[in-house]
């Protein structure tokens, strides 16, 4: 075959003998895309986003139903809890003004803690005989349901605004962030059964390691929902700190640490926490590093860093890598299997970074659901 | 997705005898929490403690 003698006129129907109908077939789509391209793209993208929003809506409804069923079936609610739960789901938090950042952390901490404290009191009114364990579970389920409700509302608002304005560029950021939002929302939806049954989640690996070290030792409550044990290891004094299990709580480790350093001379802090793995990294891999390993809004980390800096205490950390979903759903076998290895690494870290007679604080950071001490 | 496989997670509890160290894996029961003393060991007269609670996911 000879490929060198193409007749482009013939190929694209541009010759004198071309059919006017064929010309229209070429020109019409060009005109259509020039003038209506954005609307077509908006239409196609909208269909994808609509599917995502329908999923988010179903997650929101499912989480609300699960919460209501849990309260009705497990707690002796005085009255019908639906109205109260719906009111709790609409709770919002207005973050402090940050135009002047001076003192912003204290303001954020005050706002967040006020919300936590008052939600706890209000949830308790659902059933005054509710145990502390049940209270923490209901609080966590409420947090999941209200987060899913908020996500749905924000995404739906962004979508409807773009549609109302018929504005394609407005829908672009939504299209870009939606897969990440869906991943988080699906993880939250899948987390519900674990918290209902009081099972340990991936984030609980830190408390699991420290909890085992605290077994058969005297415990004291050192801050709200935070447990402390003092033990000796190879002529060193260890202060073991974790959230008070087996309820679903992260406790207040920074307050606990503050109290410990006020009364004792501390030479090192070791923190054990779950950390988000990067794409391509193996789940349940363990890494050591420096600095305060603690997530959340940032106030706890700020407080721990401030205490460590003011007293010149080095902070070491061990993290167990996992995905968002693994962190908040039932602990996987791979993560649970790392517990013994992490504990050995903690002891090794103590020996390497402290001398005999020194004192070290070990903090197991994370949600302690299903993990007592 | 049409071609995505359904994932099923089964919840397990791993018990370990504090005396002989024998491990037993069974299905999770409501009320199981880590480190709780559960039952007598089948191999010796020691007590078993819950060592791990975890989920294993299989694709259908």
Image (tube, rainbow, N blue to C red):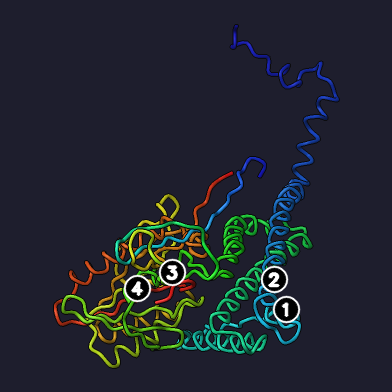
Which of the two labelled residues, at mark 4 and mark 2, occupies the earlier sequence position? 2
Please name the residue shown 78% across and 46% down the image. A35
The nearer-to-camera label among 4 and 3 is: 3
B30 sits left or right of A7 in the view: left
Q: Which residue is mark 3?
A: B38
Task: Examine the rendered structure and indicate whether residue A270 appears above or below residue A329.
Answer: below
Q: Which residue is mark 4?
A: A210
The nearer-to-camera label among 1 and 4 is: 4
Q: Chain of mark 1?
A: A
Quarter of the image where the C terminus of chain A is located = bottom left
Check chain identity for marks 4 and 2: say if they share one. Answer: yes
Few, some or many residues within 10 Å of mark 3 (<14, 14–19, 20+): some
Quarter of the image where the N terminus of chain A is located = top right
Disc 1 and disc 3: Cα gap in Å?
Answer: 39 Å
Camera-nearest residue between B27 and B2: B27
SS assignment at label 3: strand
Disc 1 and disc 4: Cα gap in Å?
Answer: 37 Å
Camera-nearest residue between A158 and A204: A204
Image position, residue A135 (x, y; %): 58, 82
Q: Which residue is mark 1?
A: A86
Task: Examine the rendered structure and indicate whether residue A340 appears above or below residue A106.
Answer: above
The nearer-to-camera label among 3 and 2 is: 3
Disc 4 and disc 2: Cα gap in Å?
Answer: 34 Å
Task: Examine the rendered structure and indicate whether residue B20 appears above or below residue A36.
Answer: below
Disc 3 and disc 2: Cα gap in Å?
Answer: 34 Å
SS assignment at label 1: helix
Spot the residue most to the top. A1
Disc 4 and disc 3: Cα gap in Å?
Answer: 21 Å
Few, some or many residues within 10 Å of mark 2 (<14, 14–19, 20+): many
Camera-nearest residue between A307 and A325: A325
Callout 4 touching callout 2 (CB < 8 Å): no
Task: Examine the rendered structure and indicate whether residue A129 appears above or below residue A295.
Answer: below
């Amino acid at each position: 075959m000879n490929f060198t003698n193409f007749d482009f006129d013939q190929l694209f129907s541009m010759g004198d003998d071309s059919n006017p109908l064929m010309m229209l077939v070429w020109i019409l789509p060009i005109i259509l895309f020039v003038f209506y391209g954005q609307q077509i793209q908006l239409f196609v993208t909208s269909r994808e986003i609509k599917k995502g929003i329908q999923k988010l809506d179903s997650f929101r409804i499912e989480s609300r139903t699960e919460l209501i069923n849990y309260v009705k079936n497990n707690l002796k609610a005085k009255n019908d809890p639906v109205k109260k739960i719906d009111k709790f789901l609409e709770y919002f938090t207005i973050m402090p003004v940050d135009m002047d950042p001076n003192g912003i952390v204290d303001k954020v901490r005050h706002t967040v803690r006020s919300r936590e404290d008052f939600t706890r009191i209000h949830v308790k009114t659902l059933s005054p005989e509710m145990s502390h364990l049940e209270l923490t579970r209901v609080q966590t389920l409420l947090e999941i349901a209200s987060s899913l409700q908020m996500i749905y509302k924000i995404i739906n608002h962004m979508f409807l605004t773009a549609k109302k304005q018929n504005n394609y560029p407005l829908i672009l950021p939504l299209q870009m962030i939606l897969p990440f939002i869906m991943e988080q929302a699906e993880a939250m939806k899948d987390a519900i059964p674990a918290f209902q049954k009081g099972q340990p989640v991936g984030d609980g690996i830190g408390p699991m390691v420290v909890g085992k070290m605290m077994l058969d030792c005297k415990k004291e409550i050192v801050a709200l929902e935070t447990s402390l044990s003092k033990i000796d290891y190879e002529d060193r004094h260890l202060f073991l700190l974790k959230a008070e299990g087996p309820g679903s709580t992260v406790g207040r480790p920074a307050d606990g640490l503050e109290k410990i350093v006020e009364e004792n001379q501390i030479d090192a802090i070791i923190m054990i926490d779950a950390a988000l793995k990067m794409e391509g990294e193996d789940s349940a891999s363990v890494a050591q590093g420096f600095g305060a390993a603690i997530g959340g809004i940032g106030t706890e980390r700020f407080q721990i860093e401030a205490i460590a800096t003011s007293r010149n205490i080095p902070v070491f950390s061990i993290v167990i890598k996992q995905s968002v979903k693994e962190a908040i759903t039932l602990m996987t076998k791979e993560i649970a299997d790392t517990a013994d290895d992490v504990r050995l690494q903690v002891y090794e870290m103590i020996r390497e970074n402290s001398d005999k007679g020194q004192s070290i604080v070990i903090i197991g950071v994370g949600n302690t659901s299903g993990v007592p001490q | 997705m049409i071609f995505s496989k359904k994932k099923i997670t089964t919840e397990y509890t791993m018990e370990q005898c504090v005396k002989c160290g024998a491990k037993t894996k069974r299905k999770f029961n409501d009320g199981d929490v880590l480190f709780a003393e559960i039952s007598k060991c089948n191999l010796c007269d020691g007590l078993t403690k819950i060592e791990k609670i975890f989920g294993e996911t299989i694709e259908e």
